[in-house]
Image (tube, rainbow, N blue to C red):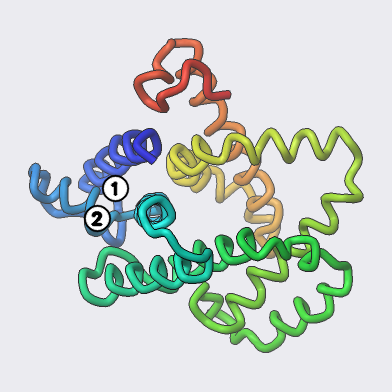
Amino acid sequence: MAWIFIPYTIMEISYACMSMLFPVWDGIKEISASVLLGKVLLDPIGPYWYLHTFILCGTTYYFVHTYLSSTPFIRLLVTSSLLLLFSYIFHLLTFANAFYFMAGTAIHLGNVRSYLVSPLLFLPLSSGFSVQPAGESEQSTLGGILITGLVISLSLYIYKHLPHTVKQASLFIGKNTLPILLFSPVFTALSKLFLPFFSFDPTGICFLCTATVITLYGSIFIAFCLDKARLSPFFFGKKILI
């Protein structure tokens, strides 16, 4: 968690400073040590809320799992209670986001992953899309939770039937999730420059596919450059990340 926190802190501070120059809806108005520290520890701006939530949830569960001698269910219950406290009393995170961490932990502890993979999930997935109001695909709504869970399950089923080469490519992306999460905002912003070239496609699908490829492999390329420059030990705590 420390070696997630360090690059998270660097990128969150960088993003906050850049928000002074670019139109970011939740950007800061002034740069000071207290403002930047508050964004890192309490209220991150931009897409880095995910890493902030993950660090807080993971660290909390680690201490509960390490120092509380009890059943997995009790540990899960205590962790959930603490995250509720952090959410509604201290406002350190949104509990709806922490819910997904706890759901994944419960699935892992219950060892029921094999029961969540089925081609029949396409039917409830399509129902989830139909009951989810347009423009309200928030992860905290019932439809959002249903769609998220079913997409993951259906993707796991599809993965089992992929050719070996495609599997290896998807695993490569999965193993390098951290640099993608850290550096993707750079390429998300740059991709907007190419948006006028895709005006021929009213659906936006062509732009979506292009921007996704650029973002994925651009982020991995930055991590590769950090490896070659021998900066990864200072940034990620690893000699080689990619």
Q: Residues within 10 Å of mark 2 (few under 14, many from 20)?
A: some
Tell me what residue is drawn at x 30 percent, y 53 percent: 23
> Any mark on residue 141, and which?
none
Residue 102 place in picture, x, y as percent:
50, 66
On-image quarter of the N terminus: top left
Please state which amino acid type lies under the numbered disc 2: Gly
Residue nearest the viewer, comparing 206 with 74: 74
On-image quarter of the C terminus: top right
Going from N to C along the chain, the mark reached first, 1 or 2, is 1
Do the residues under discs 1 and 2 have CB atoms within 8 angstroms?
yes
Residue nearest the viewer, comparing 72 with 93: 72
Picture layout, residue 187 above or below residue 30: above
Tell me what residue is drawn at x 88 percent, y 68 percent: 119
Relative to 52, is 28 on the left or the right? left
Name the residue at the front extreme.
Answer: 69
Give the foreground label among 1 and 2. Answer: 2
Q: Quadrant of residue 124?
A: bottom right
Tell me what residue is drawn at x 70 percent, y 52 percent: 206
Residue with the mark numbered 1: 22
Relative to 97, is 200 on the left or the right? right
> Any mark on residue 27, and which?
2
Please state which amino acid type lies under the numbered disc 1: Phe
Residue 221 place in picture, x, y as percent:
55, 25
